[in-house]
Image: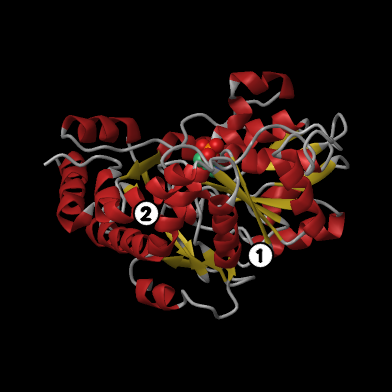
Amino acid sequence: MNVPLLDLSPQYLSIRTEIDEAIQRVVASQYFILGPEVEGFEAEMAEYVGVPHAVGCASGTDALLLPLKALEPRTGDEVIIPAFTFFATAGAVWNAGFTPVFCDIDPVTFNVTAETVEAVWSERTRAVVPVHLFGQMAPMAEINELARERGAVVIEDAAQAIGARQVPGARQAMEVGGDHEAERHSGGDNGQVMAGAAGDVGAFSFFPTKNLGGFGDGGMVTSHDDELAEKVAKLRVHGGRQMYHHEMVGTNSRLDALQAAVLRVKLPHLSTWTEARRTNACRYHGGLEELPQVTLPETLDGNYHVYNQYTIRAHRRDELREHLTGKGIGSGVYYPVPLHLQVCFRELGGRQGQLPETERACREVLSLPIFPEVGQERIDRVVDEIQSFYEG
Ligand SMILES: *Cc1c(COP(=O)(O)O)cnc(C)c1O
């Protein structure tokens, strides 16, 4: 029995009729650019996240790029981002015209904290982009407070965290396993804030591997700020609401109507799929918690983790990965190279040893199959193979 890292087919097959009808609806209308499907999905996302504005765009990368461009950077203006994230976070900052400044992470959650952000703050800091890595939100209350005091904008990279939420201010560590039931029941409306509604702006991706995945690229910007949302809506259509009148130099970055139609079918199923991911996380926890060679992901108290990835730390990570591959089990290393050490950012002067927790994470992390339909049997198989690798 092989276990792929991700298999998108069972999800499609479970809602095939609805999806095929939605695609057919768009094809029949011949309305492909913006229009009713995109507007409908924007309204549904705004309601889901709990913000007044949601603006669809071409990708998660552009959902970061457009609000950053809206800040109209001057040369040398800085944006603080984690060194441990997908490259898009840094690429968007750079392409918007900012200088990315990399900060370290909390070893427990892999996320930035107010402390790691503050450690690299400067006179030139204009914005912070906390990334809700693997599906757990960064501590937003503290980061917001720091940014507000110093007049910077907070843009959440929520690409991996649609549906994640947190009780503002909660930050005590809690393990996934034993207290899982308690965490589960905290998933409600008791003062929690959703990813994408916790900062000034939120950026989502609908890349197929994300928790809400389209049939191609897609993204969404969420915001509380009327003016910023309006600017983003202009920037995605070459900088003007009215055709052939341009107030800014924007670009072409729209959410495709076909993608919007697919995503509108999927959004009502998201909470069921997220709960399946969380159940899978519990299964791994039950199977692996006694193994001293691995460290399991922890959820901070007050956080609702949506497990876009189930990421452990493992002794002899590369050998373990090779062993799993040999047994037909997929796994992933997110991410092997820290951003401050990427060749393209050499001129920024990053050096080995600068951000020790990021660099250690790059050596130790391994993501295991967690997609909603993976199921108990295949998880047991993964657990058995990890055990047999260490116990011989
Ligand atoms: C996927 C991802 C992005 C970019 O999304 P795309 O839709 O692929 O452009 C940005 N940030 C993080 C953390 C991601 O995981």
Does label 1 point to a residue whose CB lies under 8 Å from ligand 1? no
Q: Quadrant of residue 123?
A: top right
Instruction: Name which of mark 2 and mark 1 comes first in the sequence.
Output: 1
Q: Quadrant of residue 344?
A: top right
Given the image, on which type of amino acid does mark 1 rest?
Val
* CA distance separating discs 2 and 1: 33 Å
Does label 2 point to a residue whose CB lies under 8 Å from ligand 1? no
Residue 296: mark in rendering = 2
Above or below 223: residue 7: above
Whether residue 45 is visible to the viewer of this picture, yes or no, is yes
Above or below 249: residue 225: below
Give the total number of marks visible in the rendering.
Answer: 2
Q: Residue 90, image x and y in percent?
A: 64, 34
- Disc 1: which residue: 51
Residue at 48%, 54% in the rendered image = 135
Which image quarter holds the N terminus?
top left
Above or below 21: residue 184: below
Q: Is residue 292 left or right of residue 384?
A: right
The single residue placed furthest to the left in the displayed view is 1
Given the image, on which type of amino acid does mark 2 rest?
Leu
Q: Is residue 181 left or right of residue 60?
A: left
Residue at 31%, 62% in the rendered image = 276
Residue at 47%, 44% in the rendered image = 259
